[in-house]
Image: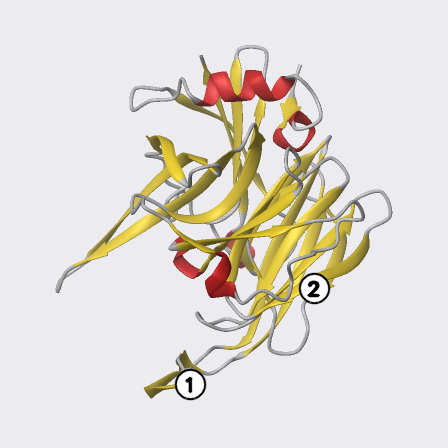
Amino acid sequence: MMTSIGYAQKSSSNLLIHQRLLKLNVSSKWNKTAAISLKFDAHHTQGMIKIGDYFYMSSVEVIKKTERYEQPINGLDRDTGIGKGHIFKFDKDGNLLADLLVGSGDIYHPGGIDYDGTYIWIPVTEYRPNSSSIIYKLKVETMELTEVVRIKESIGAIVHNLQNNTLTGANWGARKFYTWKLDKNRKVNNRNLAPEKLAKENPSFHTDYQDCKYLGDGLMLGSGKMVYKNDVTEFHIGSWEIFNLNDFRPVRQIPVTLWSPTGEMMCNNPAAVEVTDKGLRAYFVPDDEEKAVLFIYDIEL
């Protein structure tokens, strides 16, 4: 039996996922079972969902890098750059099956994605903090993409809470959360509220969430890393964090001390997880472009 998080929201399996994720600790053994090279240009990978035998991954294609201003202009520290946003569908062997463009104009940077059993939820922002975003929903059965709402804030990851029918997005660096109420047609009914009226501070500084998944019962899994620098070098710490969206506080913080052969933290950007007979199975794509590899780890619990 294998149950992905996206399906767990609609079944009792969410309890099993909760129980197993909450057992993870610093001593948990992560056993690599596969490393599958992606047979396409993955560009700069961002978020990932596994649905059945297929993977859906968001990515940004950078055509012209952003350039920093000498001084901030209207609260922005850099120009927009030029790029394209992608949602890739690929199989377990790394073969590309579909490539869907997402975004509009300067809004081309997709982030961490979530799946609710019907739709994949996709935030796309400008490639700079304190800018603007579009939230999309992608119907998996038809690959129909629908714009849901535009927001004057940089949203880097999003989850859909089926228990209270809300969307919660994390901003650039995951320092703030924003929650939008959905109606029965999955349209935002508080879209006119300014972001600052919706903002909740993230009290945890342990992880800069790159990819988030809703677990059920008000809990979210955030996967990411933190980067620390001094005058000589820098080092990265990867981790998973279980976060309570009811009171916006962390429940459990789990170090993920895994690296790809390039030296990149395994928690750099896309991450997905599912239940197995003996524990959990984790999926990561930490590297970009021609170096992109799907790493699979089994965790016995």
Q: Nearer the viewer, residue 253 or 64?
A: 253
141, above or below 78, in the image? above
Q: Amino acid at mark 1?
A: Asn
Residue 139's x, y, as percent?
Answer: 80, 47
Q: Residue at x 57, y 61 (%)?
A: 43
Nearer mark to the viewer, of 2 and 1: 1
Q: Quadrant of residue 72?
A: bottom left
Asked if residue 50 lies left or right of residue 221, the reply is right
Q: Position of residue 295 (x, y in %)?
A: 51, 36
The answer to whether one can see residue 283 in this image is yes
Among the 4 quarters of the image, the one containing residue 216: top right
Residue 123's spot in the image, x, y percent?
60, 58
Q: Amino acid at mark 2?
A: Val
* Residue 102, numbered label: 2
Pick the front one: 299 or 112: 112
Residue nearer the viewer, 119 or 218: 218
Q: Which residue is mark 1?
A: 74
Is 260 situated left or right of 143 in this image?
Answer: left
